[in-house]
Amino acid sequence: MLALMALVFTLMLPAAGLALSLFAVVIAIRDLRLLNRERRGIGMATGAVVLSSLAFVLGIVTTGFQLYFSDELTAYNECRKGAGTVAAQQDCSEQLMRAFEQKMGVAWPQGVPAPA
């Protein structure tokens, strides 16, 4: 249950999900060792290790993305707050795409929609 919560938190609040997933990995490994020692079924504990590890990796990637693009994301959020029309919101999305292109050094991929 803790591993599942870590995955959900990682998708909603990456930094909190990262901390919770680390805690879930530790608890799941402890349970796995205890169940293995008692010769009981380890399926749920193994699933918890896998799920919490996935949440941890996803949390690292998402948090890293947010930190690397923090200036661009902040500018996009500020632009969206002031955008009162659909055209203004689309301009904000285009500015974000150009900022990503400039920071990454590659063009925005064709067929990938702009953030809304």
Image: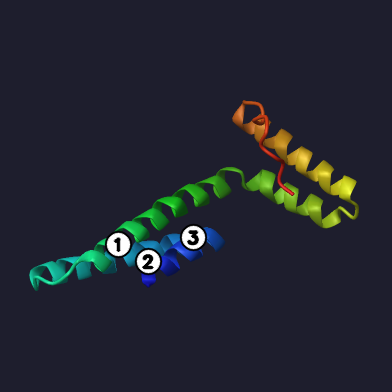
Callouts 3 and 1 close, C-beta under 8 Å: no
Residue at the spot x=49%, y=65% of the render?
Answer: 8
Q: Which residue is mark 2?
A: 3
**Residue position for label 3:** 10
Tell me residue 48's x, y (percent): 31, 64
Q: Amino acid at mark 3?
A: Thr
Q: Quadrant of residue 50?
A: bottom left
C-alpha span from label 2 to label 3: 10 Å
At which x and y percent is residue 65? 54, 45
Mark toward the viewer: 3 or 1: 1
Label whose residue precedes the other's in the sequence (3 or 1): 3
Q: Is residue 91 above or below residue 46?
A: above
Label 1–label 2 contact, CB within 8 A: yes
**Which residue is the site of mark 1?**
47
Alpha-carbon span between mark 3 and mark 1: 17 Å
Left or right of 98: which side holds 12? left
Q: Residues within 10 Å of mark 2 (few under 14, many from 20)?
A: many
Foreground pick, 56 / 41: 41
Q: Residue 92: x percent and y percent?
A: 80, 44
Residue type at numbered disc 2: Ala
